[in-house]
Image (tube, rainbow, N blue to C red):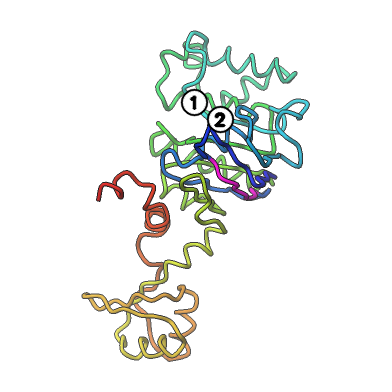
Amino acid sequence: MITIDSLTKKYGDAIVVDTISFTARPGRITGFLGPNGAGKSTTMRMLVGLTEPTAGSATIDGDRFADLANPGMEVGVMLDASAQHAGRTGREILTIAQQTMGLPRHRVAEMLAVVSLDATEADRRVANYSLGMRQRLGIATALIGDPAVLVLDEPANGLDPAGIRWMRDLLRDHADRGGTVLLSSHLLREVEVIADDIVMIGHGEIVSQGSKTELLKAGGSLVRTPEGDTLEQALAAAGAETDRSGDGALRTSADPGLVGRIALAAGVALTELRTADGGLEDMFLELTADTQREGRAA
């Protein structure tokens, strides 16, 4: 489990991370989201001991990263897939990690197979790797110690659609086996698919956090029915706000589950019922609007 408690980082008078607190729990994938410059990378660097906090704490199962006896066996970290020795081969980089952690030599071959780097690619210098190949090598390095906790910054960057699906399945399997995943990404649709919990940060402060299901419920529902007037009256009687769109659909503040129950009680047949469009992306842009360069220009 990852615990961030009142974590703060200042550079002079500038507050980069401002007393943030959240928990990434075992068995779940936590999406850590925010615009560029919001404090995500600084937070993750403080978590893994690369940046000293000004105040507060960041721990893994109650211990600071710096106090772990063999960190790679407990926490797999990938903060920048391009920050690898360009003159070494992929196999050499994994071998260094294997020897540093005191792991058996076969772990190198196992990890190359897991991330689908073949023998030719493994023996190629990293300088000649594509970004996607560097991502795969970074994930292999994070996984080689079989850690329970993964801390990954933009792991899907540079991966093609098949690679993104592979990464999604890999992380889902890790969490389903009881692991903890803290995932930072700009691919909001991908985070919406994979994450169980969401933490959003803007200007160094948390602007929203909670389970994905509960946060997206706030977006309301879109529903279609031949009996729109009847359903609208039933929703209003239940205290739900409604709005009729030009094509006859109803948008309501109620979540889809509640809309379904109200429609059933009212004897109304539905032809469509879903979470309102936008989802995580719209929520993200709304909550971080004052930190967006485009929003400030507008």
Which amino acid is tagged 1?
A: Ala
Q: Nearer the viewer, residue 107 or 69?
A: 69
Look at the image and say whether residue 241 sits in the magenta stretch. Answer: no
> Where in the figure is residue 291, as x and y percent of width and height?
39, 47
Position in image of residue 74 (x %, y %): 71, 33
Looking at the image, the residue that sits furthest to the top is: 87
Res. 78 mark: 2
Q: Label for residue 81?
A: 1
Q: Is residue 21 above or below residue 124?
A: below
Foreground pick, 220 / 175: 220
Tell me the CA gap for discs 2 and 1: 6 Å
Q: Amino acid at mark 2?
A: Met
Question: Of residues 246 and 56, which is closer to you in this image?
Answer: 56
Residue in view at x 52 percent, y 24 percent:
137
Q: In the rendered structure, are the residues bearing label 2 and label 1 in contact, judged by CB atoms less than 8 Å apart?
A: yes
At 67% from the left and 43% from the top, the residue drawn is 2
Kind of element beneath mark 2 = strand
Please tell me which residue lies in front, 117 or 206: 206
